[in-house]
Amino acid sequence: MLGERPAVAALLKGDEAALHAAGEQGIADLIAVATEGKTTEEIVEDVEPLLKKGAHPKFGVSYLEVSYQPMKELLALLAANGFQNWICSGSPVLITRELSDEMFGIPPQRVMGSNAGTKLDERDGKTVLVFDGTVDNFNDGAGKPVTINLALGLRPVFVGGNEGGRGDIAMMRWSKDRSGPSFQLIVNHDDGDREYAYSESDNYSLNAAQKYGFHVVSIKNDWKTVVGRSATEKKMTALTLAQEYEFRGGYPTPETTQKAFDEADLNRAVRAYRFFYPTVSNAGFGRRTCGSVSSQTRGSAS
């Protein structure tokens, strides 16, 4: 019975140490318990209500709001400069797809993750995909480069990952070994007060970062805000909006509507300028010298 498997038994008992010790097989067992016999639609229907219900015990916000603010800022910066952002996670891909757009602004078709075994079945006269209690691909460690290659067909230029589970080093090394420039960033979870401190006993990931030249970011020393905006930032944002935009009866005034459209046009113009300025500059330089230019295609970030 599934309840006799170590990871499942540990979860039922609330034994976090035993659950962590169960490793990859434990995760596979938990996925099997959670999905076996259910259709893909049934799993999706269960995800969002659970995440919106209640608050995270550590951060005091809903689970959908538990995402790293510096990560969201970095993703926005990359997207504004022509990069295509992807998620490559060990979590089940079907579940991560339901969260990716709302939490990170990444569309579900750019999500890679672990895949539970599925089979085509028929229920109530309609075809459905049903989980069979197995795991086709556990997307961690050496499995991540394989998954990325299947999805993208190339090595990513920019990769971000975490220490604490050893699972991102293979992906970072694969990115580092590409032809051309690359950047690998690893987050050191060393702030037990504001987040969690779960360093590896052998410092595997941090040692690998030093050996291969990955960039290390400390949550404790480098992040002003960990999850979401600070209360002060939220207060200032609300105050600024109240001062700049006028609403009557819950609706924006014509002046406010026009102001919003004007600011959207300005933002688009600034983005277009920032994106195309290097290309135009290179073209002008080429005409003044040899009459030809070479273009550089940006890679994908995951």
Image (tube, rainbow, N blue to C red):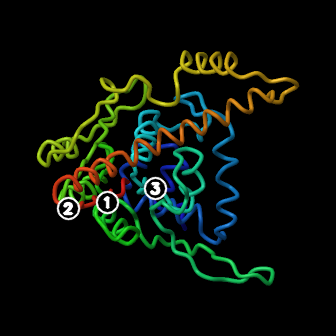
* Residue that badge 1 annotates: 297
Q: Is residue 163 left or right of residue 116?
A: left
Depth check: 16 or 142 in front?
A: 142
Give the side of residue 42 with respect to residue 215, left or right.
right
Residue 88 falls in image quadrant: bottom left
- Quadrant location, the N terminus: bottom right
Q: Amino acid at mark 2?
A: Arg
Q: Quadrant of residue 108?
A: bottom right
Residue at the image position 66 percent from the left and 69 percent from the top: 38
Residue 16, horizontal then vertical, whole percent? 44, 43
- Which residue is drawn at the image coordinates 26% and 41% (left, top)? 200
Helix, strand or loop at mark 1:
loop
How crowded is the residue under tag 2: few (<14 C-alpha within 10 Å), some, or many (20+)? few
Q: Nearer the viewer, mark 2 or mark 1?
A: 1
Viewport quadrant of the C terminus: bottom left
For mark 2, what is the residue? 178
296 versus 258 height, above or below: below
Query: Which amino acid lies under the numbered mark 3 shown in the image of this protein?
Result: Ala
At mark 3, the secondary structure is: helix
Depth check, mark 3 against mark 1: the one in front is 1
Residue placed under numbered mark 3 in the picture: 7
Give the CA distance from mark 3 to mark 1. Answer: 45 Å
